[in-house]
Amino acid sequence: MTALLEDRVVVISGVGPALGRALALRCASAGASLVLAARTQSRLDDVAKEIVDAGGRAVTVATDITDQASAENLVAESIAAYGKVDTLINNAFSIPSMKPLARTDYQHIRDSIELTVLGALRLTQLFTPALAESDGSVVNINSMVLRHSQERYGSYKMAKSALLAMSQSLATELGPQGIRVNSIAPGYIWGDTLKGYFAHQAEKFGMTVEQIYEHTASNTDLKRLPTTDEVSDAAIFLASPMASAITGQCIDVNCGEFHH
């Protein structure tokens, strides 16, 4: 992993305490220089400090990807910092409504699509000239919700399915410029966010976190859940020269919970 992204510049949106942080730290460990984007400056500063303290390079740009001027500023700051961009990782995320579609507020669905789909499209459009110069790549972080139709995930599946369709269309449209566009669909990600959720579930049902984990992992072939680092490594692979002939694809990272 140590040299897969050597001398490459990676822009990551939606950098927070969970997968965004892991993506940033793993990309830095693979040799990349980072541009970290999210709405909350304090979160960006925390992750950037970790990277710099470990000997890496990272700049932060507070960004609202649903706002055109803010997104344009991200592009300008990225180029000003490094002179180029090799990979854009669209990781911005909104919490699903977790209600049946019959009772889901339309505005919640609109907001989810605005961030998840149109936000990723906006950044991809704006970074296209820079990515074309570097024969670069886009990695869109999707979800295993693509692979099931479980109750309460309807609005989330709508947004993520639209993100996948958009990714495939962009792969076709941007391919002639040398830009690759791929997706990752993680399953449950074993990190602090899920640990907190499992702790809540354990208290609610009078179980232990270990029992909740074992029950959830029993649905996978490997009988475990992928970690934030493992999901991040799939993104690094798609961003690296090792994936130079791969575009328009979606890699599932779910320890075999769903097959596609």
Image: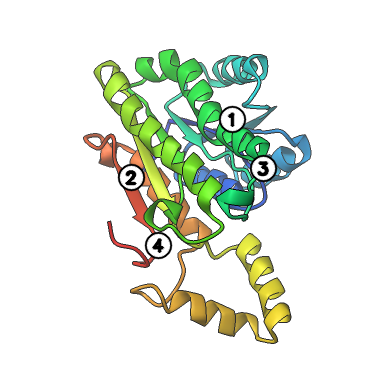
Mark toward the start of the polypeptide (1 vs 3) = 3
Badge nearest the viewer, 1 or 2 = 1
Rendering coords of residue 129 (x, y %)? 42, 13
Image quadrant assignment for residue 221? bottom left
Mark toward the start of the polypeptide (3 vs 2) = 3
Image quadrant occupied by the C terminus: bottom left
Q: Which residue is mark 2?
A: 250
Residue at image location 33% in from the left, 45% down from the top:
250
Badge 1, how many Cα within 10 Å: few under 14, some, many 20+? some
Mark toward the start of the polypeptide (1 vs 2) = 1
Residues at circles 3 and 4 in contact by the CB criterion of under 8 Å: no
Q: Secondary structure at mark 1?
A: helix
Rendering coords of residue 92 (x, y %)? 58, 38
Q: Which residue is mark 1?
A: 114
Q: Which residue is mark 4?
A: 254
Tell me if residue 241 comes above or below residue 214 in the rendering.
above
Image quadrant assignment for residue 238? top left
Q: In this image, 237 relative to 17: left or right?
A: left
Q: Nearer the viewer, residue 91 or 106?
A: 106
Badge nearest the viewer, 3 or 4 = 3
Q: Is residue 89 visible?
A: yes
Q: Nearer the viewer, residue 119 or 96?
A: 96
Q: Which residue is mark 3?
A: 105
Badge 2, how many Cα within 10 Å: few under 14, some, many 20+? many
User: Callout 1, which amino acid?
Assistant: Glu
CA gap between label 1 and label 2 equals 21 Å
Q: In this image, 237 relative to 29: left or right?
A: left
Q: In this image, 42 relative to 33: left or right?
A: right
